[in-house]
Image (cartoon, helix red, strand yellow):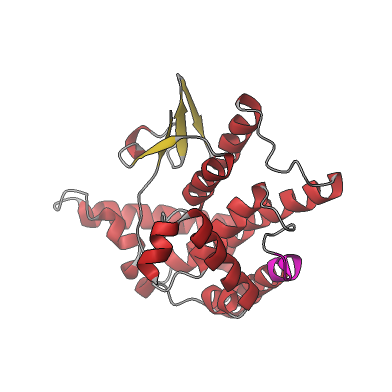
Amino acid sequence: MITLYTFGPALGLPDPSPFVTKAEMLLKMAGLPYCMDTKGFSKAPKGKLPYIRDGDDIIADSTFIRLRLEQRYRIDFDKWLSSKERGLAWAVDKMCEDHIYWLSMHARWDDDKNFKRGPARFFDAAPVPVRPFVKWLTRRQVRRTLHGQGASRYTESERTILADRAFGSLSAILGDKPYIMGNQPCGADATVFAFVLSALCPVFDTGMRTSAESYSNLRDYCARLIEQYYPDQAQAQS
């Protein structure tokens, strides 16, 4: 059985990391049996989650987890898509991971109020004497990364504009379809669901949350996929 290493449910989300949620969605969509382990972060081969143990192999990074499932288990998440549609689905996938992700990271880690509501709680397991230092050091490293990537160089209004263009694009592509590319789920749905759901998290007060909430089809899309893939969570929220 495949073991998926996760942080565990938090902030009302299946996992605080959209990349972990994406990986779990891929496993659910593939119909493969799996279990989850929330104690694997210290052994993460790339220093972050998710990763999986599949037999004797360790595969890190949600994209390479997808490739593993496709190659070893002969699963084609996009089998019903044309070549053009596959290209669009992959581009959508990467817009979420390489654009929306950084805006989300800035909103959660750089804003003091949002940091206290979310990421600061991740350090509760650290020993009390060193907890403030570990929290400060990690946050400083994240802020340096955000500055290097560029997200923290924008004004808040500029970040909101960028977020709205991204969610507006997702909304336009989704339209009135049940899934991002049509009547059946594809690989990109695992990513779009994970990142839109993360942006909609009510714990955080952000411009990107306001933007995501303004698109009713994105809200409905997340609600449908929660009902389909996380029925226990959907029932708890009802």
Horizontal side of 160 relative to 48 (left or right) equals right
Q: Residue furthest top?
A: 56
Residue 154 seen: no
Residue 74 seen: yes
Horizontal side of 92 relative to 57 (left or right) equals right
- What residue is rendered at 72% in x and 57% in y? 183
Name the spot of residue 66 as percent of width and height, x first: 60, 37
Residue 174 colored in magenta in the image = yes
Q: What residue span does the magenta drawing correspond to?
A: 170-177
Residue situated in front as seen by the camera: 198 or 180 = 180
- What residue is rendered at 44% in x and 55% in y? 142
Name the spot of residue 117 as percent of width and height, x first: 33, 69
Name the spot of residue 106 as percent of width and height, x first: 49, 65
Answer above or below: position of 143 versus 68.
below
- What residue is rendered at 56% in x and 44% in y? 26
Horizontal side of 35 relative to 186 (left or right) equals left
Residue 150 colored in magenta in the image = no
